[in-house]
Amino acid sequence: MIAVYGAGGIGCYVGGRLAATGTPVTFVGRPRMAAALAEHGLHLTDYLGADLRVADVPFETTPAGAADADLVLVTVKSAATEGAAAELAGVLKPGAVVVSFQNGVRNGEMLRSRLTEQAVVTGMVPFNVLNRGAGVFHQGTEGALDVQRDAALTPYLEAFERAGLPLAQHDDILPVQWAKLLLNLNNPINALSNLPLRDELSQRAYRRCLAAAQAETLALLDAAGIRPAQLLAVPMHRFPAVLRLPDFLFRRLASKVLAVDPLARTSMWEDLEAGRTTEIDYLNGEVVRLAESLGRTAPVNARLVELIRAAETDRRSWSGPDLLRELS
């Protein structure tokens, strides 16, 4: 049995795809989500036209719901990782496989430090999932699930393949995590813009904000000896230059970046809309921590952290030019 621990947008989507294609899955999460899925079931769609439903959703609201799981997919927000690790340590059976499908770069290590009798695997979800309410979850961008290569995952590969979410295994997951984090530096920009991803990325001023955050991060990664993996057709070190191109050239040369579902938004936008604390400390805040470890600063990313923290209590929409001036 597979358990999804922290069944929010990502957890409901990934677990739902597995359940819809015949894999036994139990979801563990908040009573609010339990009530919504009890009423509506799960309805899963994606940008390619997939349309899947799960009528009867096994959902538990306490950690004991994961006690019998052979595989646990941890999808809680990064700030909740330490708490989730403590909860799981009290209920999981020895030998269970635990996969961190979370943003940031340190969640696998945090889980591993507490779950010493389980096999902990670091993973990453590269695509966006929009919670449309009433049990509807929509994948708006492409990507396979990325995981650290581990033989413990072998029994589950076929189930993920059947679900349309194949596991892409990597000998070293850290460069992949940093590459995803470089892309996720757009999350606060998108959230502050209050626009769908495609509309935001169509505007050069917003792209220049992202380019500044990425260029600052890439310089720090170079200093730390970390080379991010190539997730796009363009190498990550060249991507800031592409983002700065005028709109007509960007549309021509980077059309795939704009070929995202019109519904696609970032999870940070969802968090601000719902009045929840965001994961900013585990995205742009991770860049600030890296800079501090090197005796440097990261003013662009630090300012984005400040703006999102302010938006958590006082929501406003930023135009591209206004945000660019704020970061310059």
Image (cartoon, rainbow, N blue to C red):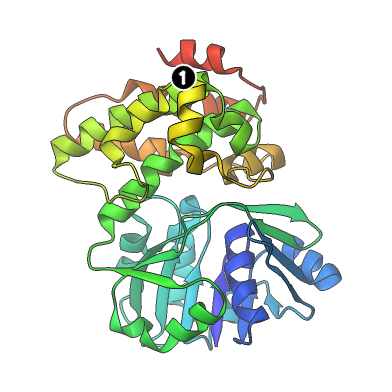
Q: Is residue 292 visible?
A: no
Mark 1 highlights which residue?
246
In x, y percent, where is residue 93? Answer: 43, 87
Q: Measured along the vertical axis of the image, is residue 61 above or below residue 174?
A: below
Label 1: state its secondary structure.
Answer: loop
Q: Quadrant of residue 164?
A: bottom right
In x, y percent, where is residue 309? Answer: 53, 29
Q: Nearer the viewer, residue 233 or 95?
A: 233
Q: Is residue 113 visible?
A: yes
| Other residues around mark 1 within 10 Å, as few (<14) / some (14–19) / many (≥20) | some
* In this rendering, position of residue 326 left or right of residue 302: right
| Quadrant in which the C terminus is drawn | top left
* Badge 1 amino acid: Pro
In x, y percent, where is residue 8? Answer: 63, 60
Q: Residue at x 70, y 38 (%)?
A: 273
* In this rendering, position of residue 262 left or right of residue 203: right
Q: How many marks?
A: 1
| Quadrant in which the N terminus is drawn | bottom right
